[in-house]
Image: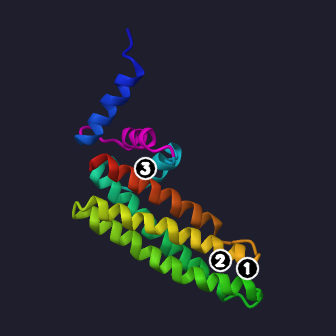
Amino acid sequence: MRPPAALVVVATVLLVLCGVDATVETTCKAAADEDAHVNYNFCVSELRKHYQSSDTDTWGLAKIAANMGVNNAYGAIHDIEHLLAKPSMDAKTKVALGQCQGLYDNMKFAFAGAYDEINDRNYAAGKEKAAKAVSLAHQCDDAFVKAAVPSPLKQHGLYSVQTAIVCMAITNLIK
């Protein structure tokens, strides 16, 4: 006889909250169950890439998610610098890239701040910093919309938003 699905979900959440067997899969499942914005497959695939993800608890996974955001922001800044160095870049795109360079620099600090706050167990402050990263990603997207040019940073923006959502959702599990 199989237990009811609701009982399985409750048991999984309790295990994650207690830090017992907080695997990437169980944590991402609990996060996705609690927040419909969490993409389970993204959560699992991206957290699994980190070398410490299999040996940590929910608190550690929240910090790993914040660190993923820092790394993505650094990657975006590097890409922006590379794109701005191209002599063939049109003026509208250069202006938007310049705006996004500052936004991703701020995002790097927002995710780093989220990491620090979560590490210090200041969960509300950590979630606020991660939420700021979402706003910064949207501001960059808006810069390209206003310039009426396609964004070469679209993937960085999507990754930043989903990473911040995962970070906040996992942090909600450890309250």
State the residue at coordinates (40%, 56%).
Answer: 167
**Residue corresponding to mark 1:** 147
Residue at far top of view: 1
Can residue 143 be found in the magenta stretch? no
Position of 92 with respect to 46 (left or right) is: right
**Mark 1 Cα-neighbour bin, 10 Å: few <14, some 14–19, many ≥20:** some
Mark closer to the observer (1, 3): 1
Position of 118 with respect to 95 (left or right) is: left
Q: Considering only vertical position in the picture, is 26 above or below 160?
A: above
**Residue corresponding to mark 2:** 143
Indicate the quadrant where residue 88 lies.
bottom right
| Distance from Cα at disc 2 to Cα at disc 3 | 33 Å
| Distance from Cα at disc 2 to Cα at disc 1 | 6 Å
Can residue 23 be found in the magenta stretch? yes
Q: Is residue 127 visible?
A: yes
Position of 80 with respect to 59 (left or right) is: right
The answer to whether mark 1 and mark 3 are in CB contact below 8 A is no
